Each structure stands twice: as structure tokens, then as C-alpha cells.
Image (spheres, rainbow, N blue to C red):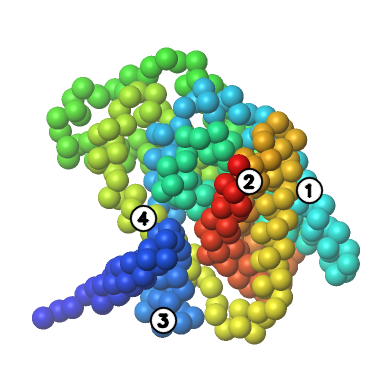
Amino acid sequence: MHLDPSLPILVSVLFGILVIGFTLRRFHQPHVVGYLVAGILLGPYVFAVVEDKELIGRLGAIGVVLLLFFIGMEVSPKRLVSSWRVAVIGTLFQILVSILCVWLLGEWLGWPVNRSILMGFVISLSSTAVVLKILQEWGELDTDVGQDVLGVLLVQDLAIIPMLIVIGLLGGDTPSLLTVSMQIGGGAFMIFFMGWLFVKESVHLPLAKWLKNDHEMQVFAALMICFGFALITGLLELSTALGAFAAGMLISSARETQWVHQSLEPFRVVFVALFFVSIGMLVDINFIIEHWFQITTMVAAVFLTNTFINAGIIRMLDDSWSDSLYAGALLSQIGEFSFVLAAVGLQAGIINQYGYQMAIAVIAISLLLSPTWITFIKKIVLRKT
């Protein structure tokens, strides 16, 4: 009998996720940690069960799109707009302070200015996927802290575009006028669209009444809405995840969330898991062992600085100290889109291969340890309140 070579790999991945997931759940760790550990163990640097990281990474990217789509369905546009001060002002201050901190460190280490700016960008982005997954699992997405953090994460996603332009300029690459125009136009379109959803009391989806009793067509319609919006924002040189989030808000405004949830929930679980597995596969254990002291120091510095920078800024915008500290902990890790910034910095010659591997290790470990750090800060906050 002919055996598909991908079948043993698929079984190994599923078995690894099950065993590691059940083991870590006994220690009250979220599923995210299990997926990351499974990726590390199954990846090319440990047991090498899966060597095609690009395929897993592409499938994982679908998971991010689906995750943001589901988050969009749970968000109230009015409540999101009401916290715009924290989202916009807080994010801008946080990025500037992160760059300043890294620039001061770079002056001590003798880094060129362009490298300091790049690394400031890298540490300023938090993980949309990790934070929203944790808030969902803990049932805190609809809280005041959850809404504030969600707003910050969305503004960070929009901030990636000017960051990429700046990195290109620092590396000597000038973006075309067409690209910049499309990004500006795309950003304006997204703001207009979310404003329209805010004003509208209810939205009617075309063909909605024909879909109510047809489960198979519901699956395709839901996927079409999710990936259609992601495609639009991708063509406009924006984040595809941002488009999926807007699609989720549209579904929520149309009061059609029930059948969409039922149709796409299994897809979301599988592809989000693959996303975190793909991140785990990037971790080079040998590199971490060789440079463990530098990496440990940088990860600790990232958690401390990001937590207290975000907490201080949110506190200045009138939140309580306990909520601000908890929000700071939620935003303390380095985000998945920072992998993209590091890769662009490597291509632009701003960092070398060593710097790139160091960035990958610090980002991945911060993602891995993030749930533990958030839980620790949360317990401290609860004791004080």
C-alpha cells in the first residue's frame, strides 16, 4: 500500500499536541504554551519530525486571521471607540519610550542608530494572538482591561505599516509612491469602515436568510467573509489580520454570530494551534544554550520594561494602578509580527545573522513564558485589591 509521507508527520504533530497539552493543563497552563512546546520539540532543532517550517508557518498565518475574525465578532464597536485614548495615545507613547530605552542601551553597547530604532520597534509590539487567546480562555475579553488591551493591540497592528517603511528607509530602501498611497488609503478605509459600523444600529448581510438552514453553505459563506476582508486589506498593503477583525465586527453588527461560530470554530482551533506550533519551530535550542546568559537577561529586561512602560502609560490615562499593572503584564511579551520586523531588518543589513537569531530566541521565549508572567502579575494585583 502507498503511504502518504505527510501522514506520519501529521500523526506526530497531533500526538505531540495532545500529550504536551494534557501534561501542561495539569499545571494550569493555557493551551498556547502546549502548542509552543510542541513546536520546539517537533521542529528541526530537536527531534526534526517536521522540517518544512514554511508550510506550517503559512498554515499558522491562517490561524491568526481566523483568531482576529472571531475576536471581531465579540467586540462592541461603541465600547472600542470609547477607549480610543488608551489605544492611540498609549500605543504611541509606548513605542516612543521603547525606542528611547533601546537607544540608551545602544549608546552603551555602541550600536548604530538604525539598529536601536529597529530593536525599539521589535520590543514595542505585543502578541495579538497570545494575549487575545489568554483573554478568551479566561473570559476577560469583555472587561475594561480586556477592551483597553484589545484597542492597544489593534493600533499596534496599524503601526506595523509605518514601522516597515521606516526600516526600509534606514536600510536605504525607499518605498514606492504607489505602496505608500495604498497604505494610507487602506488605513483611511479601515477607519471609515469601523466608523460606519459604530454609527449603524444593525447591518443586513446579503443572502443571510438563505443561509440560515444550509449548514454547508454557511461554512463557505463564513470563510468567504473572513478571508475576503483579509484579502482586501492585504492588497492595500495592510495586515490581513486587521481585515479579518473588521469582518468579524461586520458579522457582529449583523447579529449573525451564532451560525458563523458554529461553522468556523473547528477551523479556528486547528489553525491557531498550527500558528503557535510554527513559532515554536523557529527556536534554535543550540543557539539558546550557547548564549543562555544574554538571552535570559534580555527576556527578563523585556518583561520588566514592557510591563512597567505600558502600566505607567495606561495609569496616566486614568486607569487604576491595579488594572494598569495587569494590562501592562498582558502586553509585556514581544509579538509575532516582530518576527517580520526582524527579518526585514536582516534583509536591509541593519542587523546581522547573529542579531537575527538573538531576536528570534528572545521573541519566542517571551511568547512561551508570557502566560506564566501574566498569571504571576495577576495574582499580585488580586492580593492588593
Residue closer to the observer: 307 or 289: 307
When the figure is inspected, residue 378 is found, relative to residue 217, above or below; the finding is below
Q: Amino acid at mark 1?
A: Val
**Label 3 vs label 4: CA separation?**
21 Å
Query: Which label was assigned to residue 271?
Result: 4
Point out the tag, 3 or 4, that comes first from the N-terminus.
3
Disc 4 crowd rating (10 Å Cα; few below 14, some 14-19, many 20+) is many
Is the C-beta separation of discs 2 and 4 under 8 Å? no
Image side of residue 69 versus residue 344, left or right: left
Q: Residue 173 appears in which quarter of the rendering?
A: bottom right
Point out the tag, 3 or 1, that comes first from the N-terminus.
3
**Whole-percent x, y for residue 339 in the image:** 59, 60
**Label 2 vs label 4: CA separation?**
38 Å
Residue in the image at 36% along x and 29% along y: 251
Image side of residue 78 versus residue 69, left or right: right
Q: Nearer the viewer, mark 2 or mark 4?
A: 2
Residue highlighted by disc 3: 48
